[in-house]
Image (tube, rainbow, N blue to C red):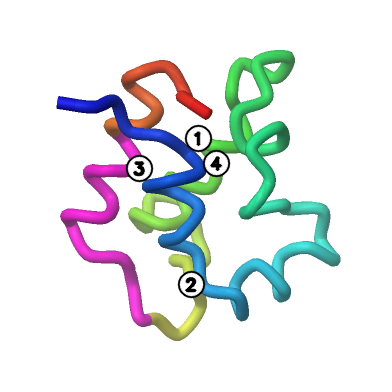
């Protein structure tokens, strides 16, 4: 089984409307370097994940549709596997 990669598996999960909405706030959902930043102990990816699962509020994306369990599991797997490019 191939490892989960940001480019092939994670980035396509974000809708362009979500990317465009979050960018002015400094949240770069489509940027690997931002999402996987090891200098912050990967805090950006973890924060995005927490908002997507709803453990941090507001539950994202605001108003839905919220991510499926399958997509959330894929994002978590990407993190668990070491934030592959």
- Residue 21, relative to residue 70: is it above or below? below
Structural distance between the alpha carbons of marks 1 and 2: 15 Å
Mark 4 or mark 2, which has the lower sequence index? Answer: 4
State left or right for residue 10 relative to residue 40.
Answer: left
Q: How many marks?
A: 4
Magenta segment: 65-76
Which residue is label 3 attached to? 75
SS at circle 1: helix
Does the stretch in magenta take in 74? yes
Q: Residues within 10 Å of mark 1 (few under 14, many from 20)?
A: some
Tell me which corner region of the image, top left, top right, bottom left or bottom right, holds residue 49.
top left
In the image shown, does 76 or 63 lie closer to the viewer? Answer: 76
Picture disc at residue 46: 1
Q: Residues within 10 Å of mark 4 (few under 14, many from 20)?
A: few
Q: Residue at x 29, y 25 (%)?
A: 3
SS at circle 4: helix
């Amino acid at each position: 089984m191939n490892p989960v990669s940001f480019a092939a598996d994670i980035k396509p999960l974000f809708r362009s409307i979500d990317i465009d909405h979050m960018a002015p706030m400094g949240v770069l959902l489509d940027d690997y370097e931002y999402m996987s930043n090891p200098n912050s102990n990967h805090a950006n990816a973890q924060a995005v994940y927490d908002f997507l699962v709803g453990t941090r509020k507001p539950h994202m994306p605001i108003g839905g549709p919220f991510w499926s369990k399958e997509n959330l599991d894929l994002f978590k797997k990407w993190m668990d596997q070491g934030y592959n490019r």
